Amino acid sequence: MGTAPKKGITPASAKAKGRAFQQLVRDKIRGILKPYGVVREDVESRGMGQQGSDIILSPLAKRFLPVEIECKSLAKSAIYGPYEQAKTHGDLEPVVAIKANRKEPLVVISLDYYLYLEQRRLEREHLYD
């Protein structure tokens, strides 16, 4: 008696999972930019399969958050090992610095911590004046 082969996630489920993650990121960005007059239409989630940044920022939203955002919802990623390790080192926010051969160094932080830092920057710079 054999075991049934494991089924992977269907393409439709994978797209739905990715779409839900993009919408989560979009909603969090809307939340931190709302005090600066940025409205819902200024921060949108790009349709699945379309080219360009996954989070579409209007010129007004880009004034406050000048970034290009790519969202990836993965079953697993090698970066979580070092991130979890960094969390065990103490009570401070975990940060992982990574670098691959012939690539620029990157820093990995949580989405909430990134948005917290951006919100603090916006408050300091008084960009809404």
Image: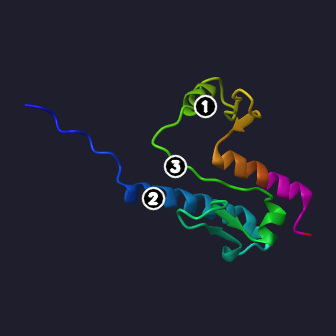
- Three-letter residue code for mark 3: Ser
- Mark 2 or 1: in front is 2
Note whether 106 is above or below 55 in the view shown: above
Q: Which residue is mark 1?
A: 83
The residue sitting at 77% across, 34% down in the picture is 104
User: What is the distance, in whole Å, between disc 2 and disc 1 at their CAs?
Assistant: 26 Å
Q: 98 left or right of 88?
A: right
Q: Give the magenta-colored segment's residue range.
A: 119-128
Residue 108: where, in percent of width, then height? Answer: 68, 38
Q: How far separated are the C-alphas under marks 2 and 3?
A: 9 Å
Question: Is 127 within the magenta?
Answer: yes
* Residue 107 image position (x, y, % from top left): 72, 36
Magenta stretch secondary structure, dominant: helix
Q: Find numbered disc 2 in the image and state the secondary structure of the residue it sits on.
A: helix
In the rendered view, would you say 122 is above or below 105? below
Give the residue type that dot 1 points to.
Tyr
Residue 61 in the magenta stretch? The answer is no
Residue 73, numbered circle: 3
Residue type highlighted by circle 2: Lys
Label whose residue precedes the other's in the sequence (1 or 3): 3
Q: Residues within 10 Å of mark 1 (few under 14, many from 20)?
A: some
Judged from the image, the secondary structure of the residue bearing numbered disc 1 is helix
Q: Residues within 10 Å of mark 3 (few under 14, many from 20)?
A: some
Q: Which residue is mark 2?
A: 15
Residue 125, how many percent across, how many down?
Answer: 91, 57
